[in-house]
Image (spheres, rainbow, N blue to C red):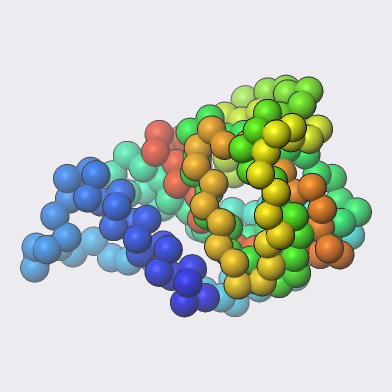
Amino acid sequence: MRNMISVFVLVSGALLAQSGTNNSKTDNTKPGTTVLGSDIQASLKRAPADGVQDESIKMIAIDKTHVGVGAVHRAAKGVNYAIIHDALTEVYHVLSGSGTLVTGGTVTKPERFPADSKTVKELAGPSWRGTTIQGGTSRKIKAGDLVIIPAGTAHWWSQIDGVIDYEVIRVDPGGLLALK
């Protein structure tokens, strides 16, 4: 959890610096936002054991950018496809389990998510999905690892070793995702 907090602070600080907000002022009264570990665990407990659940827990506005935290549960038997987010950057912090994550490369059989889908409105903004990735980089990812996936980067779990649970920080520079 310490690593996740550090990443969130770094991402938030970078966003504030880009927006021109001066964090060194002593009169800055913007409150911080806390996402409790118990909220993340509760989300993961609601997930179907043999399926996939991707749930947004909190999404806040920092000027025109929205930054959110969610929890994802993936089972080897669940639906899995390659995906590319047009403008959204994601940071994964693996809590338990392991798998092989492929990033970069080309998505095969790409199709656009419908604009009115939950994925577009709540989770990832405008995105593409496909069956696999060709020519990407494969990495074995396990509990404790962090992965930063920049906007426009294809990503796909080519293998999940049983079950993998991870926190995800989503940075939405266009402020398209619903606040929560």
Occupied quadrant, residue 12:
bottom left
Occupied quadrant, residue 92:
bottom right
Q: What residue is shown at x 32% (from left), y 39% (from top)?
A: 64
The answer, for residue 94, to whether it is visible in the render is: yes
Q: What residue is shown at x 35% (from left), y 64% (from top)?
A: 9
Q: What residue is shown at x 78% (from left), y 35% (from top)?
A: 132
Q: Is residue 77 left or right of residue 163?
A: right
Q: Is residue 13 left or right of residue 116?
A: left
The answer, for residue 119, to whether it is visible in the render is: no
Q: Can you say whether 128 is above or below 7 in the image?
A: above
Between 43 and 164, which is closer to the camera in this rendering? 164
Between 53 and 131, which is closer to the camera in this rendering? 131
Residue 157 in picture, x, y percent from top left:
75, 49
Residue 142 in picture, x, y percent from top left:
69, 67
Q: What residue is shown at x 59% (from left), y 77% (from top)?
A: 38
Residue 13 in picture, x, y percent from top left:
29, 57
Q: Can you say whether 110 is above or below 46 in the image?
A: above
Between 53 and 9, which is closer to the camera in this rendering? 9
Q: Can you say whether 165 is above or below 106 in the image?
A: below
Q: Residue furthest left?
A: 26
Q: Is residue 132 left or right of residue 136?
A: right
Residue 179 in picture, x, y percent from top left:
46, 47
Tell how many labels: 0
